[in-house]
Amino acid sequence: MSPEQKAALEALVGRALTADEATAIEPYISDANNRNDVQIAALLPSRPPKLTAGVVSTRGAAAKFPALNGLPRSYSMEVALLKLETFVATYRDAQLPAPESEGFAVAYMTKIAARAVGRKLEEFQATGLDFSEDELRDRLDDLAAQNVITAAEADGFKALALQPDPISVLDVSRALNVAENRMNLG
């Protein structure tokens, strides 16, 4: 495999090829007149999933949420939702301490967070949510940092916006043809 071919494949994968990957691909790339792009594509690792915008319903989310703590996917999501609902029920309508008291600022911000989470839960139930939105992803991280949900549960919700990004035979052919000066995309 030439350095140009290797660089082209690494650009597709988004990282350096391992020695084992390069060795496995070598027989299919070494003969310039008989390159096997189908086999090369099959041997390449997948790219990292890509963040994709789109509204996910609770039904769709239950099918894609990761299984956590030995529970099935749908139960894992229900556990996370129950934690969020409990947070809302506990703090949304909580009585605030006197404004001059020491705990007022924290209680006030917790109440605001609970109200915002409650509205998002209602939206999720009614029309679904777009888990690719930066604001929502940041709030999920905040809720995990506050131990309302676990980091794994926050990641599970955020993963609902991730889609596989496979490397196609066409991607391989195009990249290698450019690397071998058989094709110019400019």
Image (cartoon, helix red, strand yellow):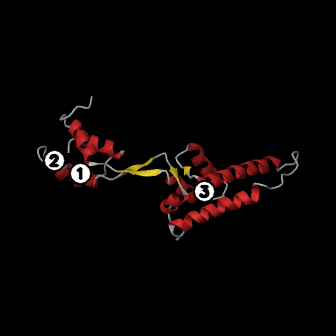
Instruction: Give SS at disc 1.
Output: helix
Q: Residue flagged by tag 2: what amino acid is it?
A: Arg
Asked whether the residues under the numbered discs 2 and 1 touch, taking CB atoms below 8 Å apart as contact, a structural biologist would say: yes
Q: CA distance from mark 3 to mark 2?
A: 51 Å
Horizontal side, residue 21 vs residue 74: left or right: left
Packing grade of label 3 (10 A; few <14, some 14-19, many >=20) is few
Where is residue 28? Give x, y as percent.
18, 51
Q: Which mark is residue 40?
A: 1
Q: CA distance from mark 1 to mark 3?
A: 44 Å
Single out the residue that lies furthest toward the top.
186
Q: Which residue is mark 2?
A: 35
Above or below 61: residue 183: above
Where is residue 155? Give x, y as percent.
54, 55
Instruction: Give SS at disc 2.
Output: loop
Instruction: Give SS at disc 3.
Output: helix
Residues 168 and 53: in front is 53
Please identify, in this view, whether the residue under mark 1 or under mark 3 is nearer the observer. 3
Above or below 48: residue 64: below
Residues 46 and 125: in front is 125
Q: Residue flagged by tag 3: what amino acid is it?
A: Gln
Horizontal side, residue 178 vs residue 89: left or right: left
Residues 78 and 71: in front is 78
- Mark 1 / mark 3, whichever is N-terminal: 1
Residues 29 and 74: in front is 74
For the point 53% across and 66% down, the residue is: 74
The count of marks equals 3
Single out the residue that lies furthest toward the left.
33
Answer yes or no: is residue 124 visible.
Answer: yes
Q: CA distance from mark 2 to mark 1?
A: 9 Å
- Mark 2 / mark 1, whichever is N-terminal: 2
